[in-house]
Amino acid sequence: MRHHAIALAALALAALIVQSPPVAAQQSGPPAALTESAIGKVVTAEGTATIEHTAVLVVQVSAAKAALPAKVGDFVYKGDVIQTGADGKVGLAFADGTALNVFNNARMELNEFVYEPNGKWNSSAFNLVKGAFTFVGGKMARTGSLKVNTPTATMGIRGTSAHVVVGEDGSVKFSTLVEEKQ
């Protein structure tokens, strides 16, 4: 039953993204040149959760690399690291409609995300170092290369929804989310 609830929440998140305008057009704030490189956006944030921007996204000032609290509406970029505390959870939506929920005590690196709606070389790679996440694959999972790396395996995703847990001992548990018929 828990998987059913997770699947429904992830599907609702994905539906919200598909109906939304492109990620870069949704927020006023940073100059367009900065938002064009955003690969996704925070759509939910609870408890202790941070985003570490590993790329420099500053126009006229220099800033040290630091983890900032995740807030709804924050953009995420290639190379960012999402980290959640014991009470943390972050929901991300990507430009292709992929929805990703990162749960408590997790660390996920957003290593790669290249998506062009009519492109032939779309690809993404995320690295779950520890913790758990669920996702609903968007357009890239069906037409490109969506990979999730864990300490013990690399998963190639092809249009499915899944729940992945990396235990403290490095073990990995993977289960697909299937909506129950009523």
Image (spheres, grey):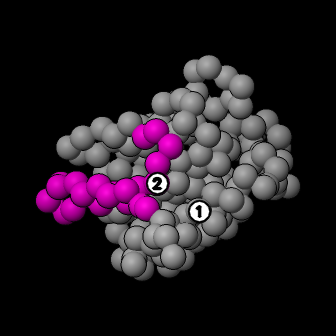
Residue at 38% over, 42% down = 148
Report the span colored magenta: 157-178
146 vs 31, left or right, is left
Note whether 142 is above or below 26 in the view shown.
above
Residue 133 pos. (x, y %): 41, 60
Q: Nearer the viewer, residue 141 or 23?
A: 141
Q: Residue furthest top?
A: 120
Is 170 included in the stretch rendered in magenta? yes
Q: Amino acid at mark 2?
A: Ser
Counting other residues with Cα less than 10 Å from the Cα at mark 1, is it few (<14), some (14-19), or many (20 or more)? Answer: some
Labels 1 and 2 touching (C-beta < 8 A): yes
Residue pictured at 68% horizontal, 59% vertical: 15
In the rendered image, residue 159 lying in the magenta stretch gets the answer: yes
Q: Is residue 50 visible?
A: no
Quadrant assignment, res 172? bottom left
Dot 2: few (<14), some (14–19), or many (≥20) neighbours within 10 Å?
Answer: many
Residue type pointed to by label 1: Leu
In the visual, does 108 lie left or right of 52? Answer: left
User: Does 67 appear above or below 64?
Assistant: below
Q: Is residue 78 above or below residue 6?
A: above
Where residue 129 sits: x, y (%)? 31, 51
* Front one among 64 and 9: 9
Residue to which mark 2 is pinned: 161
- Residue bearing the label numbered 1: 11
Indicate the quadrant where residue 11 lies.
bottom right
